[in-house]
Amino acid sequence: MRRRLGDRLLFGYVWLVMLWLFLPIAVMIVFGFNDTQSKSNVSWQGFTLKWWGRLGDYPELLDAVYNSISIALIATLITTVLGTLLGLALGRHRFRGQGATNLVMFAAISSPELVMGASLLSLFVSAGVQTGYRTIVIAHVLFSVSFVAVTVRARVVGLDPSVEEAARDLGASSWVTFWRITFPMILPGVVAGALLAFALSIDDFVITQFTSGATVTFPLWIYGAVRIGIPPQVNIVGTCIFAVGVLIAVVNSVTARRRATA
Amino acid sequence: MKRLTPYLLILPGGLWLVVFLVVPLIFMVSVSTQQGDVVNGFVQTFHIANYTDALGQYRTQFLRSAVYGLVGTVLAILLAYPVAYWIAFRGGARKSTYLLLVLLPFFVSFVLRTVSWKFLLADDGIVFEPLKSAGLLPADFHVLQTTTAVIGGLVYNYLPFMILPIYVALERVDPSVVEAAQDLYASRVAAFARIVLPLSLPGVFAGVLMTFVPMTSDYVNAAILGGPDNTMIGNIIQTEYLVNQDYPVGAALSFTLMAALLVGIFGYARALGTQNVLEAAAR
């Protein structure tokens, strides 16, 4: 009987934590449908869908969302290529400088974002580089490339080398072996790394603030709007990004389960 | 050609990391001893006083950040461990679904989550206003602009980085080991304390590394949820760089913060046995 009680307490505690985790998200979603009259969206006034039609009230907000998405796409593309190459090198080859490469990657993962942002801005200021869209992309590739490399490396290490040997024994060139055998096998790792890079980029605030110059992304716009009050349109955009994230995660886990059972 | 392959593979990514991570860090150290202003430019004068001035002036914020980071990390362990434990041992076939559920809130942008907390905790917001008009709370009750709000925000925002590594460590614990302990008449508490807990500690250590560093250097939570008495060192660095454009002082503070964190991490690693932490971090 005592065992049951302990389990129940644990169960209750876990659901309390879950509730706490979801509370601000639920509030964000619900207040996107709030029929508020004043500029400040603070108390519930009734249900409405009108904000969905009035997304264009804040053109700068839409520009910021557009910047966030396009930066994330470009950064993800570059990051995925660079990170995959790094992951292949680290997972497949033994070479001098491997330890140093690992160390730098570890530093990129574990350095506080604040310090990375501050040092990048120091560099750009010293070198006379104007900060803006391009420097944001540079920074986003920087902090996500190691995550992609680690993800791909884990996949590469788990590969059975005899499959590639078989391809080579059958006369395939190393180029053909890579694209027909190795790449399809590491593809799940590459996709997972790319998704992670996209998620990191679209959500980033700290490094972005340091390297943005006059360019504004979605998180930067929200931060700037905190003092004057957040319009319901922000809740709607947040809800949409949340929904897309959930969708991708669900599809990902379903396909993973299907692959596991197949 | 074969011997060159790994170098060709790491060249683009490695170059990116060197040019935009290693070189900037060196630049930051150089900037930290310069003098001047934005209009007339900065000149290298090896002005070490930037450090002593900055440290003297902002000692409070440094200490406050360390305390917030420590308290936040401990709270995160207390919240994350039972959740990770429940998912790993009671989740059954739906483990990955529950894990996904726990991570879902973090699909919402970091800043937006924090803003949402500000909204929830507002003095006359949807939670406190009804309680105040019902007389259940004094009219001047507030949570925003307090230490509680800032630490609460820090714990909320970095919780997944604690849950995930602990979950991974617990998931690896072979249930038959626990059964064996119970067959040998260990009580449930003893089996947990002597078997499960020690086996999961590497996950806790990794979680501490992954939450303490970002919590200590955070400035978003203090800026949105905190008041003038909650300023963290991150807020000072952000202001020096982006508002005052006093890059030397900002650089001196950033470098000090990073050095302090590095010393802390290595001290921590030493205390636990280096291998454990690096292994845990490598996962």
Image (tube, coloured by chain):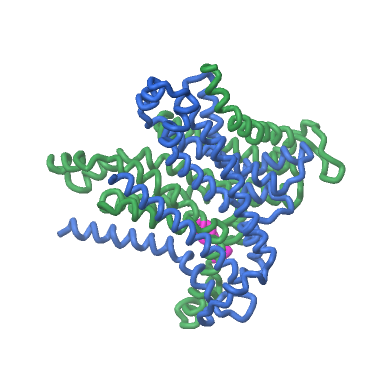
Answer left or right for B199 relative to A130: left
The tint chain B carries is: green
- Residue A80 location (% of width, % of height): 54, 40
Image quadrant in which the C terminus of chain A is located = top left
Relative to the observer, which residue lies in front, B214 or A159?
A159
Residue B147, quarter of the rendered image: bottom right
Q: In the orientation shown, which residue stands out farthest toward the front?
A: A171
Relative to the observer, which residue lies in front, B24 or A217?
A217
Identify the residue at image location x=69%, y=45%: A134
Is residue B271 among the parts visible in the rendering?
Answer: no
Relative to the observer, which residue lies in front, B255 or B109?
B109
The tint chain A carries is: blue
Answer left or right for A67 relative to A110: right
Question: For residue B50: magenta?
Answer: no
Identify the residue at image location x=53%, y=60%: A241
- Residue A128 location (% of width, % of height): 79, 39
- Residue B145 location (% of width, % of height): 58, 63
**Region rendered in magenta:** B144-153
Image quadrant in which the N terminus of chain A is located = bottom left
Q: In the orientation shown, which residue stands out farthest toward the right?
A: B40
Task: Specify the principal SS of the magenta part.
Answer: helix
Q: How many numbered discs, if any?
A: 0
